[in-house]
Image: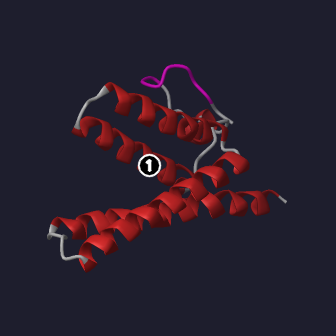
């Protein structure tokens, strides 16, 4: 184990310098961080569409538990948020299907339907993503 303070003068063994740091594997990012970041990004886009004070309060009350879940990585919070977002996504999908059946839909609805389908997948990752994390620790 070799460590020198002057990196310009001596050869530094980089593996010993960073041996105490934890690395994040890509599966943890896909399962735990990506769903929370997706829903935060959707909330920010919603607020930026029409900046109204009531929207700030509604989105703030949604983003705050997501941020708490992102930092604490709690299974219960994750599953509750996942179920809420899953039910909300299903409700929005029913609204899109209703507009398509009533022939009120335009071409832009395809993009909305894709976002809703992606949010269903992210909500499912919120629900089951932490379960796999628990089984790896045992």
Q: Is residue 68 left or right of residue 120?
A: right
User: Eyeballing the image, is 2 above or below 131?
Assistant: above
- Residue 27 visible from this viewpoint: no
User: Eyeballing the image, is 97 above or below 67?
Assistant: below
**Position of residue 138 measured from the top left corner of the image (x, y, whole percent):** 85, 60
User: Eyeballing the image, is 134 above or below 113?
Assistant: above
**Position of residue 27 measured from the top left corner of the image (x, y, whole percent):** 56, 61
Residue drawn 51% across the image and 55% down it: 85
Q: Nearer the viewer, residue 127 or 3?
A: 127
Farthest front residue?
Answer: 102
Farthest bottom residue?
Answer: 101
Q: Nearer the viewer, residue 49 or 7?
A: 49
- Please report the bounds of the magenta region as a residue range: 3-9
Q: Nearer the viewer, residue 102 or 52?
A: 102
Return the residue at label 1: 39
Q: Is residue 3 left or right of residue 44?
A: right
- Residue 48 visible from this viewpoint: yes
Residue drawn 53% across the image and 49% down it: 33
Q: Is residue 59 left or right of residue 87?
A: left
Tell me the crowding category of disc 1: few under 14, some 14 to 19, or many 20 or more residues within 10 angstroms, Cα based. Answer: some
Farthest top residue?
Answer: 5
Farthest right residue?
Answer: 138
In magenta segment, residue 60: no
**Position of residue 112 measured from the top left corner of the image (x, y, whole percent):** 28, 63
Q: In which quadrant will I find the N terminus?
A: top right
Q: Secondary structure at mark 1?
A: helix
> Mostly what secondary structure, the magenta segment?
loop
């Amino acid at each position: 184990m070799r460590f020198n303070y002057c990196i310009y003068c001596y050869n530094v063994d980089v593996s010993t310098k960073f041996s105490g740091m934890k690395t994040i594997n890509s599966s943890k990012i896909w399962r735990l961080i990506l769903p929370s970041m997706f829903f935060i990004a959707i909330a920010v886009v919603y607020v930026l569409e029409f900046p109204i004070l009531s929207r700030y309060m509604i989105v703030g009350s949604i983003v705050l538990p997501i941020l708490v879940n992102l930092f604490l990585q709690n299974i219960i919070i994750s599953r509750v948020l996942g179920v809420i977002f899953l039910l909300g996504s299903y409700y929005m999908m029913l609204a899109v299907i209703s507009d398509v059946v009533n022939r009120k839909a335009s071409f832009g609805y395809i993009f909305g339907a894709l976002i809703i389908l992606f949010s269903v997948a992210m909500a499912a990752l919120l629900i089951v993503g932490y379960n796999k994390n628990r089984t790896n620790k045992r």
